[in-house]
Image: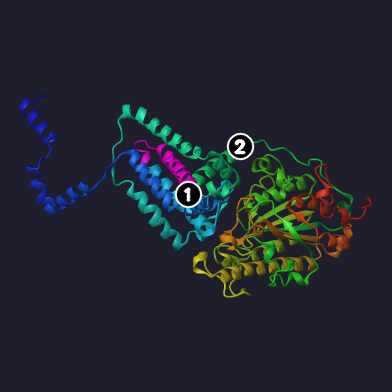
Amino acid sequence: MTYPCSDIEQDTKLLTHIPTTSSRAPLKKIFGRHFLQLGDKAKAWQPTLTPAGLNLIVATYMMVAFNAAFWGHLLRLFEGAPMNIACFGVAVWMLTFFTLSLVSLPLLHRPLAAGLILLAAAAAWYQDHLGAVIDKLMIQNVMNTTVAESRQLITVPYLRHMFLTGVIPAALLFWPRITYARVRGLLWRFPLTIAASFLLTFGFLFINLKANVSIIREHHELLGSYQPGATIGALVRYAKMELRAGNVEVKPLGQDAAKGPALLATKKPVLLVLFAGETARAQNFGLNGYSRNTTPELSQLDVFNFKDATSCGTSTAVSLPCMFSPFDRSNYSHERFMGNENLLDVLAHAGVDPVWVDNNTGDQNIARRTGARMVDVTLNPAACAGGECTDAALLTELSAQIGSITEDTVLVLHMIGSHGPAYYLRYPEGFAPFVPDCRTAEFDYCSQQEIVNAYDNSIAFTDHIIASAIKMLDQQDRVSPALFFLSDHGESLGEAGLYLHAAPMFMAPEVQTQVPFLMWLPQKFQETMHVNAACLTDRTSQPVSQDNLFHTVLGLMDISTEVYRPELDITANCRTERTPA
């Protein structure tokens, strides 16, 4: 079928007709004159920027809005040298511009720049309000955080901050028209802008290179507080760490492990209960001489309390794996831990049953070969009524384990302990010996004393849990029991403007590295394993660390293996000669 040429021409005119000013009359009838005028005005007010112009604005905004901590460190470190401050500040500003230049391509530019604003806004909040340092270990902690813990950190002030300083500025990036160069122009403008900003960054640093290099090397907190650079660097280092750790081959450890004569001679299964504490700091532990009696129940029991104990790190993601690894703090790394078996594997090789029950953020890959499980909320619904379980749920788990154990066992109970910032959720309603206590996760709403009161209440509840576990073990006759309590790290409660934990070890205060460590070894266990109580009591006044846990457990459980190091076993010199069975 064919069509007349005139019909085709007419249809083409209809399809390609673009309304001119005079042809807008029908649109006025449909939408109204004021609607069209509003659109014209909005278009007239829409600014036009080059990619470099947008980057200048965004870089300036981020340096002003999200770098209060950075400027504070810079002013302190270069006090009395305004030119040094200016040059270093401009260099870091150019570094921000350089970062933005790397993503200044059509379609990618504004979404990625918006993402950097949101990232810097989030990091700045925790940096300014809690004194947090954003490094790869902090990123590791974030990745291991549970949904429940995340909700406690996302408060109303945080959301307000994110909306005003993050969401709105990020949305405004999509308002102006950006005049990107055509492909031919991009081929030289894009790399030229990147190279120029990179050279200017180092050019301003070279003005006083000697002083700047010295400051950067000796004061990691300076660039560690720069946003978004510190967070971007932390993410990259975390990704590299996980990539390396994920590709390592696990080396066997202690495959020669075997039960010694004392363990073989026991008539009942030996049960060593290891409470892996959370965020308990030694300074607020009543047994260590704290002005408040936060450990009233433990003080009435016969325990060996080591008052000078230090942690391997300042976060669960570091300290907990380090505690169970054969490496001391100076030789520990995430990659080495992932590439080697640990204490639980050695116990399994020896025929001792390792059991991990968790009421926290998981086993941190410690029990990935031997198995781990979360607390069973159905065993104690009252302890888990608030959505998260208090550590009372672990007592129910312990009771169930005692009733079912038929072989020598090391039972690890990973506590929620004093995990912040919502300390008030760590103890049940009605359990608050220290009042008024902070009843929110947002510290800005609480006084310093209320924060300390809530934290001390959580320590007092940990005291109740450990003491109750000891009494439970002491009253049963199915197993030969012993108990350890060792916290993973401490906590800052506002000292020097720091809150929570996970400070880098090079700058971590003692409140984050000094931890409580105690043992309960009943008389029958001492006799079975030939422990001299008087000797061990004297040992409690000497320094110990989490490096000792691996070898002390092997020593007390009478496990013989070539990986055992008696010099790191706290009890080694306090055990008499063991006679063969």
> What secondary structure do most residues of the magenta stretch adopt?
helix
* Other residues around mark 2 within 10 Å, as few (<14) / some (14–19) / many (≥20): some
Q: Is residue 283 left or right of residue 222?
A: right
Residue 74 lies, with reference to residue 152, above or below; the image says above
The residue shown at (61%, 37%) is 244
Sequence order check, earlier mark of 1 and 2: 1
Please provide percent x and percent y for residue 171: 34, 50
Foreground of the two, 197 or 309: 197
Residue 100 within the segment the image draws in magenta? yes
**x%, y% of residue 132?**
55, 54
Q: Residue placed farthest to the front in the image?
A: 80
Q: Which residue is mark 1?
A: 82
Secondary structure state at the residue bearing disc 2: helix
Task: Judge whether 75 appears above or below 450 on screen.
Answer: above
Q: Position of residue 181 (x, y in %)?
A: 30, 32
Q: Is residue 228 visible?
A: no
Which type of secondary structure does the marked residue at label 1 adopt?
helix
Nearest the viewer among 85 and 297 is 85
**Residue 94 position within the rendered picture, expressed as x and y whole percent measured from the top left:** 43, 41
Residue drawn where x is 84% and y is 55% of the image: 571
Residue at coordinates 56% horizontally, 69% vertically from top-left? Answer: 448
What residue type is disc 2 on?
Answer: Arg
Q: Which residues are magenta?
A: 83-110
User: What is the total number of numbered labels drawn onto the structure image?
Assistant: 2
Residue extending farthest to the right is: 579
Amino acid type, residue under disc 1 in the picture: Pro
Which residue matches tag 2?
A: 244
**Distance Cα–Cα, label 1 vs label 2:** 43 Å
Task: Point out the frontmost of discs 1 and 2.
Answer: 1
- Answer with left or right where residue 39 lies relative to residue 430: left
Residue 146 part of the magenta-drawn span: no
